[in-house]
Amino acid sequence: ILFLLIGLQLRGIIETVRDGAFLQLVGEVALMSLIVIIVRILWVFPATYIPRWLFPSVRKHDPFPSWRSVTIVAWTGLRGGISLAAALALPLTTASGASFPERDLLIALTFGIILVTLAGQGLSLTPLIQFIHVPSDTTVEQERQRARLAASQAAQARLTELSGQEWVPENLLTHLQTRYEEKTHRLEGLLDGSTTDEVIDDGQARRRLHQEVVSAERGVVISLRDRGQIDDEILHDIERELDLEEQQLQ
């Protein structure tokens, strides 16, 4: 709504600006935008690091961020609705009834600065991230791996508890224990960084190989149904078994 309002007013504001004044307005917008960007950069870095230098409690709970992350925060000071609302809130007239001095200029400057920061800083954000080599955030992935590790360790513990039960087949128990030992080892390696890409690729290759085998089984069963050697009920029963195998592989 704010940008709609400024759009309705901007045409009238521009029409009141003559050619020479328009060029002056463009220069003022460029200068003010540069000042706004520089001031934010000069403010963000001290505001980020000084409290951590002065207060160990802050540093303990929130360690020093990398300069790359702070640079991105400093550069993303995009202006928008609040700045525009403040400019539009200026009254049309003063208490004496006279026109508010330079109201149109202030609105035009505000709109120009918003345009520069949204378009200029916004479009340059991706190149800036690539230029300073900002690492990807792995926090979510680490939390996911820790949850998987905890689940895998719980499965191992439960298998150990069931190892003495008479109803548990020894060969199946051994297979599952080996499987979860490998899974736990791989997850621990991913968390501490000791697992190589080759190990991860081996796991992916193993899953793909199993999927290829299941797909071959499915194709043969469908072919048998098409040739009339089995009916649809048998096909559906075997497909359910194959679906279960695929879910277990995933």
Image (spheres, rainbow, N blue to C red):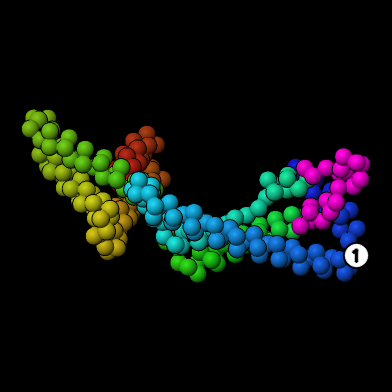
Q: What residue type is disc 1 on?
A: Arg
> Going by the picture, which residue comes out furthest to the front?
96
Taking depth in this image into account, of 183 and 226 the one nearest to the observer is 183
Q: Position of residue 16 (x, y in %)?
A: 91, 58
Dominant SS of magenta comes to: loop
State the residue at coordinates (77%, 42%): 89
User: In the image as oriented, which residue stretches furthest toward the top?
Assistant: 166
**Residue 91 location in percent, x, y?**
83, 42
Left or right of 104 on screen, residue 246: left
Seen in the image, is 121 located left or right of residue 216? right
One can see residue 180 in this view: yes
Mark 1 residue crowding within 10 angstroms, few (<14) / some (14–19) / many (20+):
few
Magenta span has 188?
no
Q: Is residue 230 visible?
A: no
Total labels: the figure holds 1
Q: Which residue is mark 1?
A: 18
Looking at this view, is 38 or 170 the one in front? 38
For the point 44% across and 62% down, which residue is it? 67
User: Secondary structure beneath disc 1?
Assistant: loop
**165 relative to 226, above or below:** above
Q: Which residues are magenta?
A: 89-109
Quadrant for residue 13, please give it.
bottom right
